Amino acid sequence: MPQAFHTDVARSSEELVVRVSGELDITVRAALVEEVGAALRDGPPPPRLALDLGGVTFCDSSGLGALLDIRRLADEAGVPMVLREVPAQVARLLDLTDVDAWLSRE
């Protein structure tokens, strides 16, 4: 049975961290983008946005689209974004689609 999708948002003086777990696909795309957008708008802009994907069990093209949408929102807010703890299957999708110019990983 697939793991239920879940996010956890934490803010510090250094960064806004959004931990994502479960399946990142079309069923959660809009909700994830909206949640991160709201977190970026809530209060002063953070120095950096980190999306922690360590708990992601599946990511398809809609999930990739969500990551790119979030990157656009971060750019509009003037906040640098980084992907953290990228699972191997998500890293493969990022490699195959050659999005490293837009989605940097640490």
Image (spheres, rainbow, N blue to C red):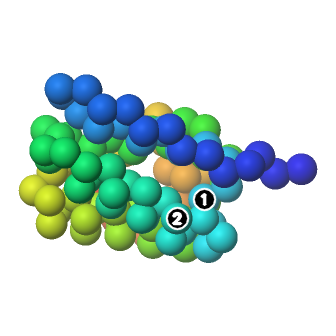
Q: Residue at x 18, y 27 (%)?
A: 14
Give the answer, above or below, for where 53 lies relative to 14: below
Q: Residues within 10 Å of mark 1 (few under 14, many from 20)?
A: many
Q: Picture coordinates of residue 89 (x, y %)?
A: 61, 50
Which residue matches tag 1? 24
Identify the residue at horizontal 60%, vertical 65% (top origin).
28
- Tell which of 77 and 43 is nearer to you: 43
Q: Is residue 66 left or right of residue 3?
A: left
Q: Is residue 100 above or below residue 18?
A: below
Q: Earlier in the sequence, mark 2 or mark 1?
A: 1
Q: Is residue 106 visible?
A: no
Quickly name the residue at label 2: 31
Residue 81, compared with residue 64, is above or below; it is above
Looking at the rendered image, the disc whose residue lies closer to the viewer, 2 or 1, is: 2
- Say which element carries label 2: helix
Which residue sits furthest front? Answer: 43
Residues at marks 2 and 1, CA–CA distance in whole angstroms: 11 Å
